[in-house]
Amino acid sequence: MFDEIDPRSPTPLYEQIAARIRVAVAAGDLAAGEALPSVRKLARELRVNPATVVQAYRDLAADGFVEMRHGQGTFIQEVSPFLRDEERATRAQELVRKLLIDAARLGIGADEIARAFHAEIGVEIHE
């Protein structure tokens, strides 16, 4: 789940960690009641400061994705379908933005992207 955490990214590490957990919840990979790794364990695994993991967990708690139980750990909360759909839409928008940025670097225009996208999903474009 955390294989895309990039310390060189301009996005702070705690935001990257929180984003990966949000995606896992939205995708159904993490279910309500599941325990997240302890702060110390995840910090060790990712080689980050424990305060970074604490900040990620706090942000997730503030957004309603997790519940932090003192002395017990951090657990995935039941997420409303609205929140799950909103998270999926946000991630879709981020994927599109990244695709367009990468395409622009290569000099690929929107029309080429649209054709490639439609070809990939098996939809014909009639011009």
Image (cartoon, helix red, strand yellow):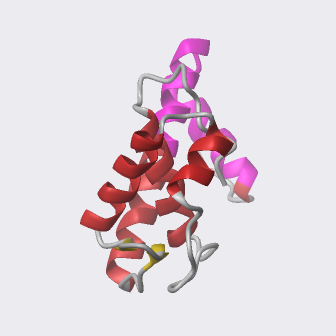
User: Is residue 115 rendered magenta in the image?
Assistant: yes
Which stretch did the figure color magenta?
Answer: 95-120
In the foreground, 120 or 38:
38
* Residue most extreme to the front: 71
Which residue sits at x=55%, y=51%?
Answer: 40
Question: In the displayed structure, would residue 3 be above or below residue 48?
Answer: below
Q: Is residue 40 left or right of residue 121?
A: left
In the foreground, 105 or 60:
60
Which residue sits at x=65%, y=51%?
Answer: 118
In the rendered image, residue 58, in percent from the top left (x then y), is placed at 31, 57
Q: Is residue 37 left or right of residue 13?
A: right
In the rendered image, residue 66, in percent from the top left (x then y), is placed at 39, 72
User: Is residue 10 rendered magenta in the image?
Assistant: no
In the foreground, 83 or 41:
41
In the foreground, 108 or 69:
69
Question: In the displayed structure, would residue 96 be above or below residue 25?
Answer: above
Quadrant location of the C terminus in the rendered image:
top right
